Image: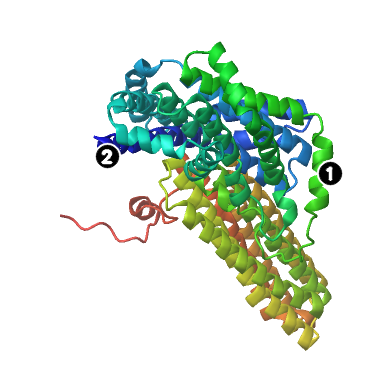
């Protein structure tokens, strides 16, 4: 009997965790980038930040997710430390709202949520937002069903003395209760799930009220452990200020409440006879009290954290990724946004290489040429880091839009890496040949190359905007520029050959260099234009190839052989 009850209990907890996970991932997939933007704008004052953290966590059903997201923003300077600490105070209160809602008998809504969620998910087609909403609805249904299973499992377990003896022995000591609940919350990544389990145990009278309150304290402490472990840079103490500040107020609250658990339990029991609701209400009052106490001195706490966790000066290594946050991999929209930001940073390096290599060629600057060549190593390393990050992300299931965006990012990074290689291995080599031979372009030839280079650089800058926004009209302009650049290359080559026929000495000396630069810039422009294809492909504006159809070609050519008769 005891083993069956424990097995059912573990299964119910697993179902509860999975339901909460589905809700959290559904919300993040639907609104992930918007949630990060909302957090980034919570800079007005600590009270606005507190409200943002409360509302966001109530939606996410996880203060851990809010904590990791906020710690990431605080680490890169998007959110200041005081508002970030206020967000975490609000997040801790936000979890109590979920617990309060689920403390009511709403299990009867589970079948309705399953039906609505399944219908929404199946009928969504390629609409990722609607699919995410269906996922959220199914997750809520699983959560309610799990709570129903836990209550039904624990009810007959009163006849299992072994189970009661086991739970009684491990919850007899309040300190042991705090440690156990903190460990469970850390392992489950969800204080909500653990508090709901504690409510079920209290409702079935498996634990006394004092033990239930001690377990709630442990769950609150455990919720602050995961952001401390998973967020921030281990090599930079400053990036850990927020999670340390969050766990600090948890520890202070637990230490203050622990000696008074017995009188608190007695007063609460006299006021609220329902043990489950009593547990939920203590959970809320504990977090509200901590928020009220700590929101005032947040400035002093932030100063203390800055003093004990000073910022470590990092070597300026451009090849080290800045935005590829591993903690965001569980949230595809955030991870894809991070990868896109890192790709833009890689693009900035490529842009600087493209700009400076023409300066080096025209001015015969050897040191600048070598510097541009060295920057290609930065591009190569960032390309590998981004591809590895996307590979880790795609190990989990992505919806259609997320998978498409992941491939767009990988494709653009590969093309940027190819551009870097052309600059390094071709254009830098041209610059060194020009320097070694002490060649000079004719004024007309230099103007043609400079103008051709300027158009290529402008197209690269436009490509960055298309990559981030998916601008269809911008993609059309970019492909039109490709056709115009092809014509411009032929015209520039014709003018160059005209100067050769005139016997211009500068043109004779630099003819191979001149034509190589034109060819390399055209190749670079072709790689730049690759960003337009994923944008225009869904519109049906792209042809399978550039060959004309055979029949129209034959009809327009009087010398074409007539078709053979059958």
Q: Which residue is located at x 60 percent, y 39 percent?
A: 221
| 548 or 298: nearer the viewer | 298
Q: Quadrant of residue 378?
A: bottom right
Expressed as whole percent of the image width and height from the top left, the position of residue 506 reads 78, 80
Quarter in which the C terminus is drawn: bottom left
Crowdedness of circle 2 by 10 Å Cα count: few (<14), some, many (20+)? Answer: few
Q: Which residue is located at x 63 percent, y 22 percent?
A: 285
Residue that carries the numbered disc 2 in the rendered image: 3
Asked if 304 appears above or below 51 in the picture, the reply is below
Q: Is residue 91 visible?
A: no
Which of pointers 2 and 1 lies earlier in the amino acid sequence?
A: 2
Furthest residue toward bottom = 437
Q: Quadrant of residue 489?
A: bottom right
Expressed as whole percent of the image width and height from the top left, the position of residue 486 reads 60, 60
Indicate the secondary structure of the residue bearing disc 1.
helix
**In this rendering, would 326 be left or right of 139?**
right
Indicate the secondary structure of the residue bearing disc 2.
helix
Expressed as whole percent of the image width and height from the top left, the position of residue 531 reads 56, 52
Asked if 538 appears above or below 445 in the picture, the reply is above
Expressed as whole percent of the image width and height from the top left, the position of residue 60 reads 54, 31
Asked if 119 appears above or below 67 in the picture, the reply is above
Q: CA distance from mark 2 to mark 1?
A: 52 Å
Judged by depth in the image, the label closer to the viewer, 2 or 1, is 2
Q: Quadrant of residue 255?
A: top right
Q: Which residue is located at x 57 percent, y 43 percent?
A: 334
Residue that carries the numbered disc 1 in the rendered image: 303
Furthest residue toward left = 566
**In this rendering, would 134 be left or right of 461?**
left
**In this rendering, would 381 be left or right of 202?**
right
């Amino acid at each position: 009997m005891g083993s069956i009850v424990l097995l059912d209990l573990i299964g119910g907890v697993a179902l509860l965790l999975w339901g909460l996970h589905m809700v959290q991932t559904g919300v993040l997939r639907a609104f992930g980038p918007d949630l990060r933007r909302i957090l980034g704008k919570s800079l007005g004052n600590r009270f606005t930040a507190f409200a943002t953290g409360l509302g966001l966590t109530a939606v996410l059903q996880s203060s851990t997710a809010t904590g990791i997201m906020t710690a990431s923003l605080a680490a890169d300077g998007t959110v200041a430390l005081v508002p970030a600490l206020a967000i975490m105070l609000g997040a801790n209160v936000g979890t109590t709202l979920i617990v309060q809602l689920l403390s009511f008998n709403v299990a009867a809504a589970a079948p309705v949520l399953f039906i609505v969620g399944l219908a929404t998910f199946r009928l969504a087609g390629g609409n990722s937002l609607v699919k995410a909403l269906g996922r959220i609805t199914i997750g809520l249904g699983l959560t309610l069903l799990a709570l129903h299973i836990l209550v039904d499992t624990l009810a007959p377990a009163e006849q299992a003395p072994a189970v009661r003896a086991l739970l009684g022995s491990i919850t007899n000591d309040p300190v042991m209760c705090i440690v156990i609940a903190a460990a469970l919350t850390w392992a489950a990544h969800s204080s909500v799930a653990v508090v709901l389990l504690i409510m079920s145990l209290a409702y079935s009278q498996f634990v006394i009220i004092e033990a239930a309150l001690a377990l709630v304290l442990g769950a609150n402490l455990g919720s602050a452990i995961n952001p401390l472990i998973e967020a921030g840079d281990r090599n930079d103490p400053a990036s850990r200020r927020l999670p340390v500040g969050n766990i600090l107020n948890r520890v202070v609250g637990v230490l203050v409440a622990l000696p008074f658990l017995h009188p608190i339990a007695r007063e609460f029991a006299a006021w609220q006879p329902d043990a489950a609701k009593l547990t939920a209400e203590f959970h809320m009052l504990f977090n509200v009290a901590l928020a009220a106490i700590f929101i005032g001195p947040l400035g002093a706490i932030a100063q203390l954290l800055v003093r004990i966790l000073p910022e470590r000066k990092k070597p300026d290594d451009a090849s080290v990724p800045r935005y590829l946050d591993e903690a965001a991999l569980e949230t595809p929209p955030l991870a894809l946004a991070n990868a896109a930001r890192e790709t833009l940073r890689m693009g900035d390096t490529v842009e600087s290489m493209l700009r400076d290599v023409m300066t080096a060629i025209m001015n015969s600057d050897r040191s600048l040429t070598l510097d541009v060549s060295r920057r290609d190593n930065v591009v190569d390393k960032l390309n590998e880091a981004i591809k590895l990050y996307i590979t880790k992300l795609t190990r989990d299931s992505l919806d259609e839009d997320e998978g498409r965006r992941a491939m767009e990012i990988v494709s653009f990074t590969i093309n940027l890496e190819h551009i870097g290689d052309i600059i390094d291995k071709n254009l830098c080599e041209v610059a060194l040949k020009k320097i070694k031979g002490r060649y000079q372009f004719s004024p007309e030839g230099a103007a043609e190359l400079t103008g051709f280079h300027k158009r290529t650089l402008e197209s690269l800058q436009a490509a960055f905007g298309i990559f981030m926004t998916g601008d269809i009209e911008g993609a059309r302009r970019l492909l039109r520029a490709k056709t115009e650049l092809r014509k411009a290359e032929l015209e520039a080559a014709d003018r160059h050959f005209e100067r050769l026929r005139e016997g211009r000495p500068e043109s004779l000396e630099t003819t191979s260099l001149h034509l190589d630069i034109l060819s390399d810039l055209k190749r670079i422009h072709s790689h730049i234009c690759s960003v337009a294809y994923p944008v225009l492909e869904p519109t049906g504006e792209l042809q399978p190839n550039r060959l004309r159809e055979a029949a129209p070609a034959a009809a327009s050519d009087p010398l074409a052989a007539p078709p053979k008769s059958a």
